[in-house]
C-alpha cells in the first residue's frame, strides 16, 4: 500500500521462525495433567516457576508493599503520580544491591548509573538506539536467543553479524571467531559498533569463562567498540563455576579509568531469576554518563509501573529474603536440571554440561537422518507433533551445527518433566530402530548404486515399502 | 562512539518546558515547609479525584493483593507477558472508552493494543505509519513532548499546521493545505495528521467542522489521522466531546478506505490521574497496524500487576460512573477558580471545556510582540512571581504571549496563593508601565525617546527591589 511504514509491512521482526511457530502449536493443544494429559508439553519457554512459593510467602507477610502503604501510611497518590524516568530511588538502590549480591558482592553498582526499562527486551533495544546508527552492526556469538533478531534489529535498523561458535570447544568464543566475524562485517561494508553476549548464555546455559571475558575485553579495546553483556540469567547460576560478570573482569584488570570502562554495558531483568516476566522490570547499567543520560530519556517510552517498582523495592530491600531466595532457588534449579539431564541420558541423549539458566542445550545430532538443517526441522516437527514436546531447534538460534535443541526445565512440575522424559525415551527407541535399519540400508545402497543401476532401483522400492509399513 | 540519537539533543529536552521543571525542583512550593517556593503550574496532572480511587482500593484489597476471590493469582500474573494484553483488562478499557464517548461509539478489544503510556503508544504508531524522513502534520500549539516522542528515535519530521487566535486556534482547511504544501516544498512525504482532542494546550474539544475538515483532508491526500484522545475523560463542560471515530461514523465511512487510516491513542494518565502506572493504548481498525503495533508493544508492555488492578477497578461500573461524574464536576469548579482568579488580574484565557489547564492570554503583559519578550515574561513569572507555567513558544504557537497554566495538580489554597501572587505581579507591572507597552512596540519607543526609556529603567529597578 505504501500507506504504512516498511517496519509495519516487513517480517524482520523475526516472528515467523519456528521459535514462535512451536509456541503457536502448543497454544492449540496445551498439556494439562488433568484436562489434557496427551497435549503438548511446553519446553520452549525459559520461565522460572520453581520458586513462586517463596515470593508468595513474602507477599503474605508484607501486605503493605502491594497495598500502597509505607510504614502503614497510604502512599497511593505519590505512586500514582510518580512517572519520573530516573526511577524510584529506593527501588534502584535495592536493585543494584541485589545485582551485587548475585555477583557475590565482588562488584558494586552505583544506582545513578542504572536505567529502568519495561523488561530486558526494551533495555536491549534502547542500548542499540544509543550505541549504533541504522545500518551499523553488532556481533553476536551463536547460538543466540532468537528474540534478538527482533529486539536488536527491527526498529533500530541495526544488523547482526554472527560470531560462529562450535561444539568442538563447547561453543566458547575464540579469538579467531571474533576476528572472522569482524572481517565478515567489513566485507559487507558494515560498521561494527560492538559485541553483545549473553552471560550466562541463552541457549547454552553456561557461564562464560574468565578467558572468554578477557578475550572479549581485549577485542573491544582493540577495535574501540562496545560490549553489551546481557546478564539476565546471572541469578540462575546453580553450580560451579561461579558467575563472573564483565564488570568484575574490568575491575580485576584495573581498567576503571580507561577508555574501555565506558564501553561496557550490562543488561539485567527480574524475569528469569525471580520469575517475574509479567511485571516488566529490566535495567541497563552503564559506566558512561552520556549513555545513562540518553537511555534515561529514552526510557520514557518504556517506564516500569510505579506500582511494581514500589512492590519490588520493598521485596528486594529485605536482605534476609533475598539471601534465602537466591540460595533456595539455586538448589531447586540444580535439582530440576539434573532430573532433565538424567532423563535425557536414559533416552541416550546427552547435553552440553551447564551450570546456569533455565534450560539445557541438548545434543540430538545422532537422531538426525542427515547432518542438515532440513533434517533438524524434520526431527523438530516430529518432536512437536508426534512426541508432543515443544522444544527449540538450534537453527532458530542461528547455531552453525544442526541437531542441537534448547530444552527448558524450570517451567513445569516434576511430574510433567518425568512424563516428557518418558515420551522422549519411547520416541528415541522407535527412531533408533528405524534409523539403524535404514542407515545400514543406505550405506549398502550407496555402494550398490555406484556400481549397479539396477540395484539402486531395487533399493528405492524397498525404501518405499518401509515407509508404508510405519 | 555513540549514536547520533544519544549525542544530539533532538529529544527536545532543552526547551523551557523542561527547564522550568528543573528550576521548580530546586525550590518547590510547600504550604508549610516552603511557602515562598515555586508553585508548579506546568504539570498537567489530575490530583482532584484521588480520594475516589483510594476509597475503591480500600474496599477492594484483593485487586491490590493479587488475589481473586481470596485465592492468590500471583503466579499467573507474574508469568503473564502476552503482548495481546490481559483480556479482562482490554474488555474493561474498551467499555470505559465507549462510556467516555457517551456510548455513541463501540470499540472492539481485539483492535486495542496496550502500551506503557501514551508516550509509547504515539511513538509506536509513528513507527508503524511512517518511515524515517517522512512527515506528520501537527496543528499548533501542540504538546512540547511530541518533538521527542514522535521524532527522536523514529526519524520522522513534524510539520506544523499553523492555527491562530483569530478564530480560537481552530484548524482550517486552509491551514491544513498550507502545511501540506510547505512539506512538499521541503521534499517531505506527509503520512498523516496527528491531533490532540481535547487539545493540549488549548483545553478545548474539537468541533464537528474541524473533525470533518481533517477527515476530508485525509481522504483527499490518502493519509492517516492519529487522534490523541488522552484528555477525552476530562471534558467538564459543553460542548460535549466528539471522537474522530464518531465523526467518521456519522459520515458512514466505516467500510471505506479512510476508516483503516484513523487511529486513536488513549491513556489512563489524565482522567484517572495514574501517570505512574504507565497505561496507554492504541486503537485502530487497521488489522496490519494492530498486528505490527502489538508486536512492537513488546518494547513497552504494561505490568501485569497493574493490568490486574485496573481491570478490577474499571469492571466496577458503579465506580466508573461515579468517578466520571464527580471528577468532571471538580475539574469544572477548579478551572472556574483559575479563570476568575486570572480575570481579577486582568488576564483572559481561551474559553475551554476540557483538559487540566487553561490557555492563557498574556499578550498585553509583553514588552513587545516577540518571542524574546515572551521568554522574558516567562522568566519573570518563574523567578519573581514563583509560578512555573508553560510558555507558548515550546508549544510552537505562532503568536507570542500565550501560556498554558495548569489547575488540577494543586490544592485550592495553593491556587489562591498563585492567583494572589499573579495579581500582585500584574499590579506592579501596570504601575511600572510594562503592561501598557504591550500594544506598542518597544523598539518604536526606544527610537523615539531614549531619555524616557532611561527613567522607565529606573522604575524597573525599584520594582525589583520590592
Image (tube, coloured by chain):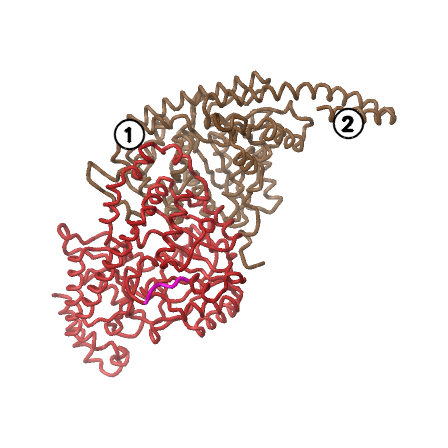
Residue in the image at 14% along x and 69% along y: B463
Q: Any idea which chain is the brown one in this picture? A: A
Of B56 and A198, the residue lying toward us: B56
Q: Label 2 marks which chain's residue?
A: A
On the image, the x and y values in percent for residue B320 come to 30, 51
Q: Quadrant of residue A470?
A: top right
On the image, the x and y values in percent for residue B351 come to 28, 69
Residue A374 lies within the magenta run: no
Of B366 and B79, the residue lying toward us: B79
Apparent colour of chain B: red
Q: Is residue B333 visible?
A: yes
* Circle 2 residues within 10 Å: few <14, some 14–19, many ≥20: few
From the image, tell me which residue sits under label 2: A464
Determine whether, in the image, residue A431 is placed left or right of residue B402: right
From the image, tell me which residue sits under label 1: A60
First in sequence: mark 1 vs mark 2: 1
Q: Are marks 1 and 2 on the same chain?
A: yes
Instruction: Identify the secondary structure beneath mark 2.
Output: helix
Determine whether, in the image, residue A366 is placed left or right of residue A327: right
Seen in the picture, residue B216 relative to B153 is either above or below; the reply is: below
Amino acid at each position: 500500500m505504501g500507506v504504512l511504514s516498511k517496519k509495519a509491512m516487513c517480517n524482520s521482526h523475526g516472528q515467523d521462525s519456528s521459535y514462535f511457530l512451536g509456541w503457536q502449536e502448543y497454544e492449540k493443544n496445551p498439556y494439562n495433567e488433568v484436562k489434557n494429559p496427551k497435549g503438548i508439553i511446553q519446553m520452549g519457554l525459559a520461565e522460572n516457576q520453581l520458586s513462586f512459593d517463596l515470593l508468595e510467602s513474602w507477599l503474605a507477610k508484607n501486605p503493605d508493599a502491594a497495598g500502597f502503604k509505607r510504614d502503614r501510611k497510604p502512599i497511593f497518590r505519590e505512586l500514582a503520580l510518580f512517572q519520573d524516568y530516573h526511577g524510584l530511588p529506593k527501588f534502584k538502590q535495592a536493585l543494584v544491591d541485589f545485582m551485587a549480591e548475585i555477583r557475590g558482592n565482588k562488584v558494586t553498582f552505583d544506582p545513578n548509573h542504572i536505567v529502568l526499562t519495561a523488561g530486558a527486551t526494551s533495555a536491549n533495544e534502547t542500548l542499540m538506539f544509543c550505541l549504533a546508527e541504522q545500518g551499523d552492526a553488532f556481533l553476536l556469538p551463536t547460538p543466540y536467543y532468537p528474540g534478538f533478531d527482533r529486539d536488536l534489529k527491527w526498529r533500530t535498523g541495526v544488523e547482526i553479524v554472527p560470531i560462529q561458535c562450535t561444539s568442538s570447544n563447547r561453543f566458547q568464543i575464540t579469538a579467531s571467531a571474533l576476528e572472522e566475524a569482524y572481517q565478515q562485517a567489513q566485507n559487507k561494508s558494515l560498521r561494527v559498533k560492538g559485541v553483545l553476549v549473553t552471560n550466562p548464555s541463552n541457549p547454552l546455559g553456561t557461564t562464560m569463562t574468565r578467558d572468554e571475558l578477557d578475550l572479549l575485553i581485549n577485542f573491544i579495546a582493540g577495535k574501540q567498540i562496545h560490549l553489551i553483556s546481557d546478564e539476565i540469567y546471572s541469578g540462575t547460576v546453580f553450580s560451579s563455576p561461579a558467575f563472573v560478570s564483565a564488570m568484575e573482569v574490568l575491575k580485576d584488570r584495573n581498567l576503571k579509568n580507561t577508555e574501555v570502562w565506558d564501553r561496557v554495558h550490562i543488561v539485567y531483568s527480574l524475569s528469569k531469576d525471580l520469575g517475574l516476566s509479567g511485571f516488566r522490570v529490566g535495567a541497563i547499567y552503564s559506566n558512561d554518563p552520556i549513555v545513562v543520560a540518553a537511555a534515561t530519556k529514552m526510557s520514557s517510552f518504556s517506564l516500569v509501573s510505579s506500582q511494581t517498582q514500589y512492590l519490588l523495592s520493598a521485596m528486594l530491600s529485605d536482605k534476609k529474603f533475598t539471601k534465602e531466595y537466591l540460595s533456595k532457588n539455586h538448589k531447586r534449579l540444580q535439582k530440576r536440571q539434573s532430573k532433565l539431564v538424567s532423563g535425557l541420558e536414559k533416552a541416550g541423549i546427552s547435553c552440553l554440561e551447564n551450570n546456569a539458566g533455565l534450560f539445557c542445550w541438548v545434543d540430538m545430532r545422532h537422531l538426525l537422518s542427515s547432518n542438515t538443517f532440513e533434517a533438524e526441522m524434520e526431527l523438530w516437527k516430529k518432536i512437536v507433533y508426534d512426541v508432543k514436546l515443544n522444544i527449540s531447534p538450534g537453527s532458530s538460534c542461528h547455531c552453525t551445527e544442526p541437531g542441537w535443541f534448547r530444552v527448558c526445565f524450570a517451567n513445569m512440575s516434576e511430574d510433567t518433566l518425568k512424563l516428557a522424559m518418558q515420551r522422549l525415551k519411547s520416541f528415541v527407541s522407535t527412531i533408533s530402530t528405524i534409523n539403524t535399519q535404514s542407515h545400514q540400508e543406505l550405506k549398502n545402497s550407496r555402494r550398490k548404486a555406484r556400481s549397479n543401476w539396477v540395484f539402486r532401483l531395487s533399493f528405492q522400492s524397498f525404501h518405499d515399502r518401509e515407509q508404508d509399513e510405519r | 562512539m555513540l549514536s547520533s540519537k544519544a549525542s544530539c539533543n533532538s529529544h527536545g529536552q532543552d526547551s523551557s518546558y523542561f527547564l522550568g521543571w528543573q528550576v521548580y525542583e530546586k525550590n518547590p512550593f510547600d504550604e508549610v515547609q516552603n511557602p515562598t517556593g515555586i508553585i508548579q503550574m506546568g504539570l498537567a496532572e489530575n490530583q482532584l479525584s484521588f480520594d475516589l480511587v483510594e476509597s475503591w482500593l480500600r474496599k477492594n484489597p484483593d485487586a491490590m493483593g493479587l488475589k481473586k476471590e481470596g485465592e492468590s493469582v500471583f503466579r499467573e500474573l507474574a508469568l503473564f507477558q502476552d503482548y495481546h494484553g490481559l483480556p479482562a483488562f482490554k474488555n474493561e478499557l474498551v467499555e470505559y472508552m465507549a462510556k467516555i464517548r457517551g456510548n455513541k461509539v463501540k470499540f472492539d478489544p481485539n483492535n486495542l493494543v496496550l502500551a506503557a503510556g501514551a508516550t509509547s503508544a504515539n511513538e509506536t504508531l509513528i513507527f508503524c505509519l511512517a518511515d524515517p524522513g517522512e512527515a506528520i502534520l501537527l496543528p499548533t500549539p501542540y504538546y512540547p513532548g511530541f518533538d521527542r516522542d514522535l521524532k527522536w528515535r523514529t526519524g520522522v519530521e513534524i510539520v506544523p499546521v499553523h492555527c491562530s487566535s483569530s478564530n480560537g486556534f481552530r484548524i482550517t482547511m486552509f491551514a491544513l493545505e498550507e502545511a501540506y504544501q510547505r512539506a512538499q516544498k521541503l521534499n517531505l512525504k506527509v503520512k498523516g495528521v496527528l491531533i490532540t482532542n481535547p487539545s493540549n494546550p488549548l483545553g478545548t474539544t474539537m468541533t464537528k467542522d474541524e473533525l470533518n475538515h481533517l477527515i476530508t483532508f485525509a481522504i483527499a491526500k490518502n493519509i492517516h489521522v492519529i487522534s490523541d484522545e488522552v484528555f477525552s475523560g476530562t471534558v467538564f463542560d459543553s460542548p460535549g466531546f466528539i471522537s474522530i471515530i464518531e465523526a467518521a461514523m456519522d459520515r458512514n465511512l466505516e467500510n471505506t478506505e479512510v476508516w483503516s487510516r484513523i487511529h486513536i491513542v488513549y491513556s489512563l494518565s489524565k482522567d484517572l490521574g495514574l501517570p505512574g502506572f504507565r497505561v496507554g493504548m492504541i486503537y485502530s481498525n487497521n488489522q496490519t497496524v494492530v498486528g505490527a503495533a502489538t508486536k512492537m508493544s513488546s518494547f513497552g508492555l504494561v505490568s501485569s500487576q497493574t493490568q490486574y488492578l485496573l481491570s478490577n477497578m474499571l469492571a466496577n461500573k458503579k465506580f466508573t460512573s461515579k468517578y466520571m461524574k464527580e471528577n468532571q464536576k471538580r475539574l469544572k469548579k477548579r478551572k472556574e477558580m483559575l479563570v476568575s482568579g486570572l480575570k481579577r488580574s486582568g488576564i483572559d484565557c481561551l474559553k475551554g471545556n476540557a483538559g487540566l489547564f487553561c490557555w492563557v492570554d498574556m499578550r498585553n503583559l509583553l514588552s513587545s510582540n516577540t518571542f524574546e519578550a515572551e521568554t522574558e515574561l516567562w522568566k519573570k513569572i518563574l523567578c519573581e512571581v514563583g509560578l512555573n507555567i508553560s510558555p507558548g513558544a515550546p508549544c510552537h504557537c505562532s503568536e507570542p504571549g500565550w501560556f498554558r497554566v495548569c489547575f488540577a495538580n494543586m490544592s485550592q489554597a495553593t491556587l489562591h496563593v498563585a492567583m494572589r501572587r499573579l495579581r500582585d505581579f500584574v499590579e506592579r507591572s501596570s504601575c511600572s508601565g510594562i503592561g501598557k507597552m504591550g500594544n506598542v512596540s518597544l523598539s518604536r519607543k526606544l527610537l523615539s525617546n531614549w531619555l524616557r526609556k532611561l527613567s522607565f529603567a529606573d522604575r524597573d529597578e525599584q520594582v525589583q527591589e520590592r
